[in-house]
Amino acid sequence: MTPPPSPPSLSVRRLAYAYPDGTQALFGVDLTIGRGERVALLGPNGAGKTTLVMHLNGILTAGHGTVEVAGLPVGKDTLGEIRRRVGLVFQDPDDQLFMPTVREDVAFGPANLGVRGAELEHRVREALERVGLPDVADRPPHHLSFGQRRRVAVATVLAMRPEILVLDEPSSNLDPASRRELAEVLRSLDVTVLMVTHDLPYALELCERSLILSGGVIAADGPTREILADDALLAAHRLELPYGFAVADRPS
Amino acid sequence: MGAGHHHQLYRPGDTVVHRLPPQCKLPAVAAFAVVVVATPRDAFWAFGVYALLLAGVAAAARVPARFVLRRMVVEVPFVVFALALPVIGLGARVEVLGVSLSVEGLWAAWNILAKATLGVVASILLAATTEPRMMLLGARRLRLPQTLVQIAMFMLRYMDVILDEMRRMRVARESRGFAARDVRQLPVLAKSAGALFIRSYERGERVHLAMLSRGYNGSMPIIDDVGASAASWAVAAVLPVAALATAALSWSLS
């Protein structure tokens, strides 16, 4: 990869946030993700992962600190463009797929951006091809399998040509085959990916680099393999590899 | 569509009636219903003509009578009400097979039965030839309030999801030995309904977030559009215009 002259895909500086009821969720998060990187954001339940994700496309607005997407700061006046640049894939595909047919659902995002006609058709077809489901366009989402629905959810944001794809627990509830199919799709994409998960093997499989979010701050940042090989680090942040699973520091 | 799944009211086909744009069919059926209701109840022949008109539409759409009859079950509550009217009605009475019936009640029963049946059959034919989502598209083309159309759209999408959730809750209840035998079990069912309501409400919030994330700004973008030519409007108008002519004749005769 050539060193990017352009700004990083995502840059978060000293981000802090407290919920309206006073619960502080983020205590100053700093992270930078370069263009084309695939990064896993690891953390136990309640670490603030989802809160952080909600900041990335301006659904929550920072109490303190800044979020920039490819150089553009998240703010009230930039929301439209920010939401185009950040493709958020939610955990439950039934929340993400709300239109009567897959085609309309994939078209929803780009149509909101003003894309119409043949160009819209093209975007829908292209997005569905990229997730390996070119034939489901006219089906209602609830007639697809769970794994297919998750991939269609990825297609709905790909159709907006995002700068960065943010996935919330992409592997949850998937059977092994769907898990592998999704991994193949994600690996084939040429966009920046931030994957929020506590599925450590999946992070190792897909992401070179990992961050640990714990207690509302970034507690570790490094190559996934090194992080997963550090038992003490994982234990300190309530992260565990599945039974019988060990990661060597260096690939043998 | 090729999916093999269809709404149970819809009967796939490729006839003139199926091909008509939804925004032409909806007002045609509505106008037909209004004309039927406005027809004097003693113009028996006019109702016969209306029935023939609908039979014509059914034939053109290749919707078999059995299909229509099975779906007419929705009318049963009205039928029960209509049948009660002659018994409980006041005023002059006649003896029919030894039962004393109110004349006014009989007229009212006939009026309700005839008009409701024609209206129900017309809407069954509309539903049988128009996919639910096309119906919504038509509603939007007719500039029905956006919010209402969107609510109907979400109902269509999430009905199955919510029914599924309801089924899972029932299975979970029954797995722990619950059986709804009599009134005493009602509180449990009421709480389940409450939980289902809250779950659906929360889902609604999550869906809204997902929509905002993809640039939703209060109005649905028009993705699929179906234009209607003057010819389609003319074809759709055949039913209400023929009905109107019949009604006009019945008014002038009465």
Image (cartoon, rainbow, N blue to C red):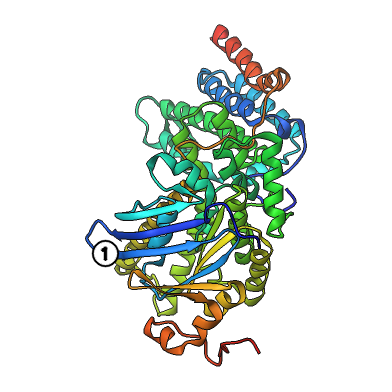
Q: Is residue A73 visible?
A: yes
- Chain containing the residue with disc 1: A
Give B141 or B23, whichever is nearer the viewer.
B141
Q: Is residue B219 above or below residue B142?
A: below
Task: Kindly identify the amino acid type of the residue bearing the numbered disc 1.
Answer: Gln
Give B62 or A65, whichever is nearer the viewer.
A65
- From this viewpoint, which residue is outermost toward the bottom? A244
| Quadrant of residue B240 within the rendered picture | top right
Q: Is residue A166 above or below residue B129?
A: below
- Relative placement, left or right, of A55 versus B242 is left
Residue at coordinates 44% horizontally, 69% vertically from top-left? B170
Quadrant housing the N terminus of chain A: bottom right
x then y, percent, for residue B162: 48, 58
The total number of labels drawn is 1
Give B13 or A212, whichever is nearer the viewer.
A212
**Which secondary structure lies at badge 1?**
strand
Q: Residues within 10 Å of mark 1 (few under 14, many from 20)?
A: some
x then y, percent, for residue B232: 71, 23
Q: Which residue corresponds to mark 1?
A: A24
Q: Is residue A117 above or below residue B197?
A: above
Give A63 or A44, whichever is nearer the viewer.
A63
- Relative placement, left or right, of B106 versus A183 is left
x then y, percent, for residue B202: 38, 57
Quadrant housing the C terminus of chain A: bottom right
- From this viewpoint, which residue is outermost toward the top? B252
Residue at coordinates 69% horizontally, 26% vertically from top-left? B52
Q: Is residue B114 above or below residue A9?
A: above
